[in-house]
Image (cartoon, rainbow, N blue to C red):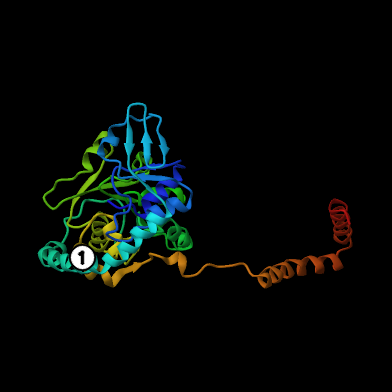
Amino acid sequence: MDMDEIAADALLEKRIKGLVNASPSLSGRYPALGPSKLLTAGIPIVDMVGPEIMETEDGTWVEMTGNQVRTSQKIFLGRRLNRQELAKQLKLAEKNLNRQLEQFALNTLDYALREMKLIFAPLVLPPLKTPIKGKHVLIVVRGRDYKEDLQAIIPYIKEAKPALIGVDGGADALIEEGFRPDLILGDMDSISDRALQWGREIIVHAYPNGKAPGEERVKKLDLPYHKLPAPGTSEDAAMLLAFESGAELIVALGTHTNLIDFLNKGREGMASTFLVRLKVGTVLVDAKGVNKLYRQKLKGTYVAKLIAAALLPITVITVIHPHFYQLMRLLWMRMRLALGF
């Protein structure tokens, strides 16, 4: 699978020194932007070294030289991904994009017809302690710019106090900003143990047949949980849960809504997402990309007005009260001595 920006960001947060990939980091099928982020950060990439590299034990010293990856047992040959090769693959990806878009649209329409009854049928809701009916609900998904978007709406969270749903790794983002998730919902594949133990309630997303890949992990941690059989992705299930529970407003950020988003996840269509948004659209506000809408800058005039407003009462008191006047003179003299003028 091609490397997306989210994977690249996660690797950069871990302060990696280099990347060895068994598969292509960029295949030219579509413009994945993860490799570009790593190269910009000065991280060398050697990919296409083959699946045998995955047998290397943790803690093994690895040396990257050109297109070679050397361990104590073997030398692997791959592709050294540089700027020239990256530009070539991105150009190929742009050419392939229309074909990918056409196939993606056909797959979406085909599966939408098949999944329509499942999506539109009422969910069997688990007995939750978290109140949702008549409230705002914020759903945080681990998607592009999700951390920046979350930081941008912190004033909204503090004012509206919505029920907080973290979808897998979205729960970690909430905790990083100082918020405790009311609900954690997902396959439990990209969430930390710390977040699972800190969330108020856990809902394991299951397939409509009841099979739930994330159930085993929660059991190993000996945590109480609910199981929610629902079609589509975990973020689809979160929206359906909030909607069916009577949420007044659903605010979603980090969600996957376009061709690149879904190809990054290895999905060839977005039928369930399309149908879910049709169903919940009357109460849905998509906050994806909200951090780019308005970035407030502190202007000099604002600072000047603030200082003037603060100085006005001090000046009045200084004129009226002689003792305060002497105190201000003393402070001024000390400031002059400290600043050397």
Using the image, determine if residue 302 lies above or below residue 73. Answer: below
Determine whether, in the image, residue 208 is placed left or right of residue 194.
left
Which of these two is toward me, 297 or 178? Answer: 297
Which quarter of the rendering shows the C terminus? Answer: bottom right
Q: Position of residue 275 (x, y in %)?
A: 20, 67
* 270 vs 128: above or below: below
Query: Which residue is depicted at the point 30% across and 41% down?
Result: 49
Front one among 297 and 208: 297
Q: Residue 308 at x, y = what percent?
A: 74, 70
Q: Label 1: which residue?
A: 104
Image coordinates of residue 328 in percent, x first then y, are 85, 59
Q: Nearer the viewer, residue 58 or 316?
A: 58
Q: How many marks?
A: 1
Three-letter code for the amino acid on which mark 1 is drawn: Phe
Q: Which residue, as the protein is rendered here, is positioned at the far top?
A: 72
Residue for point 41% across, 30% down: 61
Residue 137 visible: no
Q: Is residue 215 left or right of residue 323?
A: left
Left or right: 237, with 302 as reference point: left
Q: Can residue 143 be seen in this snapshot? A: yes
